Every structure is written in C-alpha cells, then in structure tokens.
C-alpha cells in the first residue's frame, strides 16, 4: 500500500492535506463548544415539553376536568410530530388517560415478571411523577421517535460525525478540482532564469518541455512560430493534440514522448509531420530525452524539433528526378532499339538494290523497274516514320493544331480504303467498309488528321491480320452532351492481351516484345492516333480477344446536326456508292497558261532543277542566288509567286521575306526548308511566309500548291518526263577511296542530265575555293561552301557528297580545323571519281 500511495499524484496529496486541516479545525471548534449540538438541543426540548405536559395535567387533575385534559393531550400530540403518545397512569397502575398510540419497546418497557416496576427515562420515553393535593397521584409518560434511525448509515452517526464526514469529503473534492485548474495555469517558465529562457528562444530549432501527462510546460519561440500561437498560450496544452502524425513504423506505437514515459529511454531522429499555422505540411526530426525525477522515474521530457522539410522535399525531387531519368533511359533504349530495327530494314533494301543497280546486275528493264520500286517504297516508309516522330514531337510540345472545316468523312474513308486495299490484296485478306446508317454529307472536323488516324489504324489492323480481314464500320452516336461520329476498325488478327490494352497507346510500346520482331513497327501510330482523336474532341479505345482479333473504336465530335436539311443526309447505299477518283502515276499532270515564279536558292543546280519542272508545266521562271538579289528581282521582274530557300548566304530567306513584308509586298512567298522540327511553323509564320514545303519536296505537291495559288489545272494524259524529288539530303553511304566511277542517278534523264553536267563543271572551282578558305581559316566561307555542296550534290544525284559535306559544314561551324583537313581529302577523293553524263571526260578536282 505504501508503494501505491507514493505513486498518487501531487494534486491528490495536496487535496488530502488541505481537507485534513479543515477537519482538524472543525473538531477543535466542536470541542470548544463553538459548534452547536443538534441532538442535545432536541433532548432539552423534549424534557421541557414533558415538564409542561406534567404541570398542565396536575392542574387539571385538581379541577377534575377529565374531558378538557384529554383534549389538551391530543392537541399536544398533534402539534409535535416526533411525539408518539402521552399516557397518564395512577399510582396503582390503572391507565387514566392516553393520547396517541404508543409503540412497544423491549428496551424501555417494564419486564413481564415485574409489571409495576417503573423503568428510568430514556431519550424516547420520558416519565415524570404527578402529585395531587400534596400526595403522589401517579406518573405521566411521553413516548418520542428515536433521534437516529439505526436502520440507515445516518442513524449510526451523530450530527457531529456527519458534519465532519461531509466536510472532509466535500473539501477534498473541491480542493482537488481547484488545484487541477490552478496548477494547469501556473507558469513553470517563471522559475527558469531569464537568461536561460532567452537562450532557448534564440535557438533555431523548436524546443518543448512536457510533464508526465504529455502537457506542455515550456515552449520556445521557434516552436510557437510554427504552430502560430504565443509561447504562454501553449502552456498546459497537450502536445499530442497539436496534430502530429508520423510515418508508419513496424513495431512502434505512440509518439516519441509517450514512448519515453513508458520505458524511460530517449528517442533519437524520429520523423514526424505537423501542419503549421499557414497550412503547410512540415517535417521535423524529433529527439525526446527524459528529465529525471524522484525514484529514477521521468518527471518530464525535453523535446527538440529540427525542421527538415526542405531536405525531405529535395529528397523527393531527387527521387522523382531519378525515376524520370531511369524511365527516360529505358524509353531511350527502347526507342533506339525500335528505330534501329525500323530504319535498318528499309535501308537494307535501299542500299542493297541500289548496289545491284550500280553494279549493273539487273537482267532486264523489268528488273530495274522492280528494284527502283522497292527503293522508292522503302524511302517512303522512312519518310512516314520521320513524319510520325515529328507529329509526336508536336503533340508533346503542345503545338498540335487542328482545324474544323466541312469534311466529307465518307470520301476520306473511301480514300484510305482504296490506298490500303493493295496491302490487303498482297496479304490475301479482305478490307471492307460498312455504313450502319445515314450520315451527313459533310461534318465539321479536320480531314487531314482524320486521314492520318484512319491510315494508322487500318494499316495497323492489316499488319496483324494473317487470315480473314478488316472491316470498318461507321455510325452516329446521338445524345447528350454531344453527337459523335463512331468508326470501328475490326480485324481478325492476333488480338491483344487484356493487361496490354492501355500500354499499346504509349509511344514506342507494343503489346509484346516479340511483336516488334515479327511484325515490325515503332509503336508510334496508336499513340499519335489517340492524341489526334482527343484533339478533335473524341478518343481512340480498343477491345480485343487474344487469338480472335481486335476492334479499335474511334469517336469524333460532329458539330450540330439538328439544323441539317434532309437533303444534306446520305443513305448507307449512297455512302457506299460514292465515286472515288483514282489517280495513277503519270496519268495526270498540271498545266499553267501563264505565271512568273521567282526561285531563290543559293544552289544553281537546285534552281535549274526547279526551273525545268516549272517550265515544263508552262510557268516562266526567274532566279536569284540569295535573299538580297531576290529583293531587287521582286521589284524588277514583278513575279506572281516566290519560292524562297530559308538557308542562304548573304541574306537568308527569313530576313528577305520580312523585308518584303515591311515594304508592303503581298506576293505569295513559299518557304522551302529541310527543317521539320517542332516550332519551325511559328518561325515561318512570324517571318511572313505564305506557306511552306519541306524537303524532300514532292513535285506533285509543289505543282498542286502552285496550281491553287496561280490558277493551274490538272490535265489528263501522260505527264512530262518524271522529275525526281528535290532533296537537300540523300542517302550517305560511306564512300571507298578507290577508282570506281561515281555516276549521278540523273545521268540518263533526258532533261536533267544538263544539270548534272553543269555541276560537274562547277565542282572543281568550288573545291579550289574550299581549299583556299581552309588554308586561310575562313571558317564562315568554308561552312557556306560545304552547305552548297551538301544540297547541290544530292540535287543532281551525287548522293555520296551529302554525308561528307554535312560533316564538313558542322566542323567548320565548330572550328575544328584538324578534322577539316581529313574530310577535305575525302571530298577531293570523291570528286576525282565522278563521271560526266554521255561519256564526256571525267571532271576531277586537281588540287594540291
């Protein structure tokens, strides 16, 4: 018991001591007679009442008025509730009068063997002798209720004991509650010297001192600023009630200070979180040390709080950066692996069949045409791959632009189906289109993006379908909030596992690693198609059953449909029977009745090539070698349109076009650029160009653009001699330093062979100029000459100059003179091997 008593709180000891003092004072007052005794007063009152009744009875007995005496006795009993009865008994034992009802009490009644024996008076029975005429008459007996009910606790205790007990209990409770409140508001910090408190407040880390109940008895300024409360206002508050939280730790329960009070051991470097006064989540490194008390038990806990929020945020950022870097590295590896496969496959065909043609191993013209078709198809595949990558870069850079114009969706569908039908026929699978219901003749969407989406999805379906075929189903989805065009591309191919349905829409991702090896592809088509569809207000989703096939669901916004007239709707039969123009190679060409075009390019061969193409279509061509000359030519020749190269010496195309616009010139100016990276459209638009054509330029696209702007027309019949694509770059096979002649791929062309001859005659002078610039270290001139060789060589069919010239230009702009000598020797060796068409003498650069 002694051990338990020692562990009671100080508040209990104080309340018990104060209560004992009050009881002691009360007992001393009772002993000194300062406190009235209720029982004594009641006894004295009963005795006085008995004496009064006895005197009155003797007076009336002398008058022998028995009836009146009975009334008096009854009245006295009624007026005194504690009085049970009054008995008047003569000396011979005969009852004379009685008022009330007496209660038998063995303790006070006379014994049965001595009925006449008169017992002594008690606090419940008072007996007094009555005298009449000077002689004893008998006695008067008054019976009262007991002063205490012995059946209850109060009956066993006197008034004094009850007063002492009640005082002790009430004082203890009141003192206990009073001390609880007072001790909570006492400021323990006042017992700490001022210089110590000042030192605590100057510390940058937060400090708290807690009592065993976990309440704050001291907090420094740094911690009070975190929680946004004054240090004094924190006194008495529970530290755990401030909103602490901590990361889940195995086998650890409670806060560090609770653990200290449990086992008395300090806690070090515990991470805890707290929301500060500004609502910001803060992270603290908490250290809790016990403050020794009596008996070795902790009397309190000292808490230090080191704010590590910035460190944790930096750690999170570093972790995110690491994860992003790892993901980027994986994506790069996947990208390089896919690109290596995708590029090497068509390049193998291009280089292989080009080598066959160069060595003359073809047996007949049909073989030559077949080899050229293979090279052309592989080149187009590479170009499509580059376009996909550039489209994806635009989407990811947020520069994707779509238009909403009236579009004959069914015509676009038929066009894609016609293009893809040849591939389906090659695989011996069917390709069909079904219209489930009537559709408007035109819908508001972007026809170019829609064509890309359908081409990607239908081509993808055909690629993975070996048996059966592909069906394209078209329908409308009506309802809130918008109407949508639904196009389902269903195939009977290999299908997609359920866990890969989302992943296939990520760039460079395919369902299985074996898919790339077996079917090829970069994994870009689906990613681009989904992003295009979302830009058009819809989406692309997929459902699939492995081994049975897949269905890609395309949805697009249609715009309002309720206002369309019935005549603007086409039935399913009309949609399926739409006439689709078919174009074949060499069956349609452009013809212009008049028009003057200024071609601005620093390469004479490039200008001559374009001049031949445009003059064959009926246009008049004037030429300028740089932007400065072009400004004078525009003023002097008054052309109807300008084709402007953007990268030229003296004055580039951007500067020339801006100058034209500043002078008020409104002529159409089309840019010719090999730059197809993201952001170039904005640069071209800012410079004032009317449009652009990327290199390699499709001659059909060039003529179509000029036809739209200059009023040309498409004419059926055989086109002029096939004009190759004008290329600013071409295949760059490493050239061997041997005596094998290098022949232009345009050497046998009836019109363009003259361009090749001009290049061969110009090349020696250019090489002399390059060597002179290299000797004088005129690097800017050297870079411009290398740029001319890179573009002109590819234009006239000497593709072997492209890679060395590009490397030479890069080294010149970087100022690497050591490597320039090596590349210069390589270019000179190639120049010595070129052969002029039609058997003319070889043109070799005779350089020192």
Image (cartoon, rainbow, N blue to C red):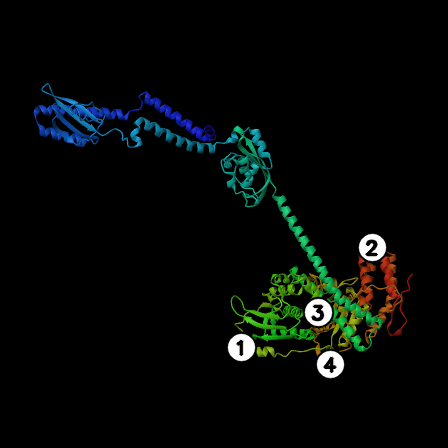
Q: Which residue is mark 1?
A: 566
How far separated are the C-alphas under marks 4 and 2?
54 Å
Number of other residues with Cα within 10 Å of mark 4, as a class: few under 14, some 14 to 19, many 20 or more: few
User: Quick one: quadrant of the N terminus?
Assistant: top left
Please identify the residue farthest to the bottom as the structure is shown. Answer: 717
User: Could you tell which of marks 4 and 3 lies nearer the N-terminus?
Assistant: 3
The residue that mark 3 highlights is: 668
Q: Is residue 493 left or right of residue 240?
A: right
Residue 108: quadrant of the picture: top left
Q: Which residue is mark 4?
A: 717
Q: Between marks 1 and 3, how big is the CA–CA gap?
A: 41 Å
Mark in the foreground, 1 or 3: 1
The reply to whether discs 4 and 3 touch (Cβ–Cβ < 8 Å) is no
Name the residue nearer the viewer: 562 or 347.
347
Earlier residue among tags 2 and 3: 3
Q: Which quarter of the figure has residue 716? A: bottom right
N-term mark: 4 or 2: 4
> Which residue is more in the foreground, 821 or 574?
574
According to the image, label 2 marks what residue?
816
Q: Position of residue 644 (x, y in %)?
A: 75, 67
**Which of disc 3 and disc 1 is earlier in sequence?**
1
Mark in the foreground, 2 or 3 = 2
């Amino acid at each position: 018991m002694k051990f338990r008593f020692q562990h009671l709180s100080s508040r209990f000891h104080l309340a018990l001591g104060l209560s004992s003092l009050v009881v002691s004072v009360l007992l001393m007052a009772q002993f000194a007679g300062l406190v009235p005794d209720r029982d004594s007063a009641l006894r004295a009152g009963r005795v006085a009442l008995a004496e009064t009744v006895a005197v009155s009875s003797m007076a009336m007995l002398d008058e022998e008025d028995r009836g009146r005496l009975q009334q008096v006795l009854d009245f006295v009993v009624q007026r005194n509730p504690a009085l049970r009865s009054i008995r008047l008994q003569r000396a011979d034992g005969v009852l004379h009068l009685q008022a009330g009802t007496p209660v038998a009490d063995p303790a006070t009644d006379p014994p049965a063997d001595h009925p006449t024996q008169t017992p002594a008076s008690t606090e419940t029975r008072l007996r007094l002798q009555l005298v009449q005429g000077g002689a004893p008459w008998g006695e008067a007996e008054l019976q009262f209720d007991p002063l205490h009910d012995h059946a209850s606790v109060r009956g066993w205790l006197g008034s004094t004991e009850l007063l002492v007990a009640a005082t002790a209990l009430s004082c203890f409770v009141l003192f206990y509650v009073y001390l609880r409140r007072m001790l909570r508001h006492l400021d323990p910090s006042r017992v700490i010297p001022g210089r110590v408190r000042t030192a605590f407040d100057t510390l940058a880390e937060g400090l708290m001192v807690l009592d065993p109940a976990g309440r704050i008895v001291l907090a420094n300024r740094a911690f009070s600023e975190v929680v946004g409360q004054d240090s004094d206002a924190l006194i008495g508050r529970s530290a755990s009630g401030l909103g602490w939280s901590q990361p889940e730790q195995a086998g650890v329960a409670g806060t560090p200070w609770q653990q200290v009070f449990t086992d008395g051991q300090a806690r070090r470097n515990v991470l805890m979180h707290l929301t500060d006064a500004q609502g910001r989540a803060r992270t603290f490194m908490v250290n809790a040390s016990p403050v020794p008390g009596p008996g070795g038990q902790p009397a309190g806990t000292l808490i230090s709080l080191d704010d590590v929020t910035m460190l944790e945020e930096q750690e999170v950022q570093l972790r995110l950066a690491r994860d992003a870097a790892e993901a980027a590295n994986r994506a790069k590896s996947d990208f390089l692996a896919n690109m290596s496969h995708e590029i090497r496959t068509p390049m193998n065909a291009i280089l292989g069949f080009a080598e066959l043609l160069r060595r003359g191993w073809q047996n007949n013209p049909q073989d030559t045409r077949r080899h050229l078709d293979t090279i052309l198809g592989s080149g187009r595949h590479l170009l499509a791959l580059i376009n996909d990558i550039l489209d994806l870069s635009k989407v990811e850079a947020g520069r994707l632009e779509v238009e909403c114009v009236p579009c004959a969706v069914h015509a676009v569908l038929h066009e894609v189906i016609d293009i893809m039908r040849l591939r389906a026929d090659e695989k011996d699978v069917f390709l069909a289109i079904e219209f489930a219901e009537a559709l408007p003749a035109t819908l508001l969407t972007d026809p170019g993006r829609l064509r890309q989406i359908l081409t990607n999805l239908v081509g993808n379906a055909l690629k993975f379908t070996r048996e059966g075929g592909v069906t394209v189903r078209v329908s409308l989805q009506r309802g809130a909030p918008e109407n949508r065009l639904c196009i389902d591309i269903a195939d009977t191919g290999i299908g997609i596992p359920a866990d890969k349905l989302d992943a296939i829409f990520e760039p460079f991702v395919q369902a299985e690693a074996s898919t790339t090896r077996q079917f090829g592809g970069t994994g870009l088509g689906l990613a681009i198609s989904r992003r295009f569809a979302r830009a058009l207000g819809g989406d692309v989703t997929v459902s699939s059953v492995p081994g049975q096939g897949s269905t890609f669901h395309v949805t697009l916004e249609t715009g309002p449909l309720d206002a369309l007239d019935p005549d603007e709707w086409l039935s399913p039969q009309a949609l399926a029977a739409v006439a689709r123009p078919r174009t074949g190679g060499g069956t349609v060409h452009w013809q212009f009745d008049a028009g003057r075009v200024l071609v601005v390019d620093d390469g004479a061969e490039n200008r001559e090539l374009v001049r031949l193409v445009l003059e064959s279509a009926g246009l008049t061509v004037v030429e300028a070698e740089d932007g400065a000359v072009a400004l004078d030519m525009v003023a002097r020749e008054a052309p109807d349109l300008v084709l402007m190269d953007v990268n030229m010496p003296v004055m580039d195309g951007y500067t020339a076009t801006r100058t034209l616009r500043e002078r008020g010139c409104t002529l159409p100016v089309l840019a010719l650029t090999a730059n197809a990276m993201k952001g170039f459209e904005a640069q071209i638009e800012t410079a004032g160009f009317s449009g652009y054509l990327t290199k390699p330029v499709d001659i059909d696209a060039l003529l179509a653009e000029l036809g739209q702007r200059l009023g040309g027309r498409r004419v059926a019949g055989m086109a002029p001699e096939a004009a190759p694509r004008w290329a600013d770059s071409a295949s760059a096979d490493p050239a061997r330093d041997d005596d094998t002649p290098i022949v232009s791929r345009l050497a046998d062309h009836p019109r363009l062979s003259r361009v090749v001859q001009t290049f061969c005659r110009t090349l020696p002078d250019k090489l002399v100029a390059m060597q002179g610039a290299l000797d004088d270290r005129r690097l800017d001139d050297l870079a411009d000459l290398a740029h001319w060789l890179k573009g002109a060589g590819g234009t006239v069919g000497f593709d072997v100059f492209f890679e060395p010239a590009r490397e030479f230009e890069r080294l010149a702009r970087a100022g690497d003179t050591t490597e320039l000598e090596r590349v210069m020797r390589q270019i000179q060796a190639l120049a010595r091997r070129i052969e002029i068409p039609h058997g003319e003498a070889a043109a070799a650069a005779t350089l020192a």
